[in-house]
């Protein structure tokens, strides 16, 4: 059995090797005089200063989830694509650093992992500003309200006030969902530059999550154009049966859409007409207050929101 300290040294050695290799490749390119737009990338398309060991270590952390809070070594290797030996080294390194714990054959994340995400949340103005407004809104509507942003092809929750549990999915800060069947996702997709939206639609396989889910790219484009024109989007049981939601954009001081805010309700309790006539005006009011506070914070020199 290799000790955790030895494993840590092995992993660190891997990082150093990657960095040295990157420096060597870069130096070789410089000495040969070859320069160009791709001169700092390998034949595989990655930057020569890409640290593969760091990428793999983060992949080990990301393979844990609410559905899989505890995993065996074999499961970690399978979910990350690493060999068992490599997965073991990374797990033992993370364990020594306090990010992973173990019980018997099972590994799980430790609370220290939260520090990695807290640095983002504590510097992200929208989440800080939005939280009290979400709590007020949830109290007024007696329904759950959230704020989300796009991260790559995912919708990520950055603030939430939960009034009740209406979904089988446990929605919390950090939850990731596909944007196409959600009201907040559609607001954010609707305000992407045309080329970015085209690229998203080309690479995304839209699955039929319920009988109501829109999966045709052409139909979704029309829905997004309508959302952009109206300034809000609603979804009726497309992400999960029995759940409806309505959302509108949050903008920074330049008018750019940087996040979306929504309210969700059970379909048996709240008709779509109620969402549009009663929920939407209050949602838009909260969004305007967040916009105003966000603009004021940025005008004082605070860090940009994205």
Image (cartoon, rainbow, N blue to C red):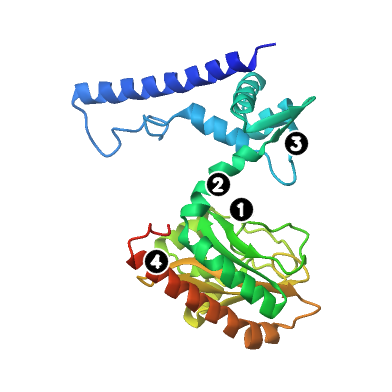
Name the N-terminal-most of marks 1 and 4.
1
The answer to whether the residues at label 3 and label 1 have Cβ atoms under 8 Å apart is no
Q: Quick one: quadrant of the N terminus?
A: top right
Of 98 and 221, the residue lying toward us? 98
| Secondary element at image label 2 | helix
Q: CA distance from mark 3 to mark 1?
A: 18 Å
Q: Which mark is residue 70?
A: 3
- What residue is disc 1 on? 174
The single residue placed furthest to the left in the displayed view is 33
The x and y percentages for residue 167 are 76, 63
Which circle, 1 or 4, is nearer the viewer? 4
The x and y percentages for residue 153 are 54, 54
Relative side of 161 to 43, left or right: right
- What residue is disc 4 on? 297
- What residue is disc 2 on? 117
Looking at the rendering, which quadrant does residue 90 occupy?
A: top right
Say above or below: 95 vs 225: above
Relative side of 168 to 95, left or right: right
Which circle, 2 or 1, is nearer the viewer? 2
Which circle, 4 or 2, is nearer the viewer? 4
| Secondary element at image label 4 | helix
Which circle, 3 or 2, is nearer the viewer? 2
Q: CA distance from mark 4 to mark 2?
A: 22 Å
């Amino acid at each position: 059995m290799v000790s955790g300290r030895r494993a840590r040294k092995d992993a660190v050695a891997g990082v150093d090797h990657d960095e040295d290799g990157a420096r060597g490749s870069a130096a070789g390119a410089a000495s040969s005089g070859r320069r160009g737009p791709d001169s700092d990338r390998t034949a595989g398309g990655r930057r020569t200063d890409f640290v593969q060991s760091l990428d793999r270590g983060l992949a080990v952390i990301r393979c844990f989830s609410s559905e899989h809070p505890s995993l065996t070594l074999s499961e970690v290797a399978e979910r990350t694509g690493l060999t068992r030996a490599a997965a073991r080294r990374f797990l033992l390194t993370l364990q020594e650093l306090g990010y992973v714990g173990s019980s018997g054959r099972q590994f799980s994340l430790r609370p220290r992992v939260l520090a990695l995400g807290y640095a983002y949340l504590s510097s992200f103005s929208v989440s800080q500003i939005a939280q009290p407004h979400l709590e007020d809104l949830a109290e007024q509507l007696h329904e759950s309200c959230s704020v989300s942003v796009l991260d790559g092809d995912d919708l990520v929750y950055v603030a939430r006030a939960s009034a009740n549990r209406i979904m089988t999915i446990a929605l919390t800060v950090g939850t990731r969902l596909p944007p196409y069947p959600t009201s907040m996702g559609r607001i954010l997709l609707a305000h992407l530059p045309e080329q970015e939206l085209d690229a998203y639609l080309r690479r995304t396989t839209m699955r039929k999550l319920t009988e109501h889910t829109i999966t045709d790219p052409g139909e979704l484009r029309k829905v997004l154009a309508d959302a952009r024109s109206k300034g809000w989007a609603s979804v009726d049981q497309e992400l999960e049966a029995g759940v409806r939601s309505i959302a509108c954009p949050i903008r920074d001081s330049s008018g750019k859409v940087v996040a979306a805010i929504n309210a969700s309700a059970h379909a048996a309790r709240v008709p779509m007409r109620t969402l549009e006539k009663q929920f939407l005006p209050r949602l838009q009011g909260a969004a305007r207050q967040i916009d105003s506070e966000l603009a004021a914070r940025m005008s004082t020199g605070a860090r940009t929101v994205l």
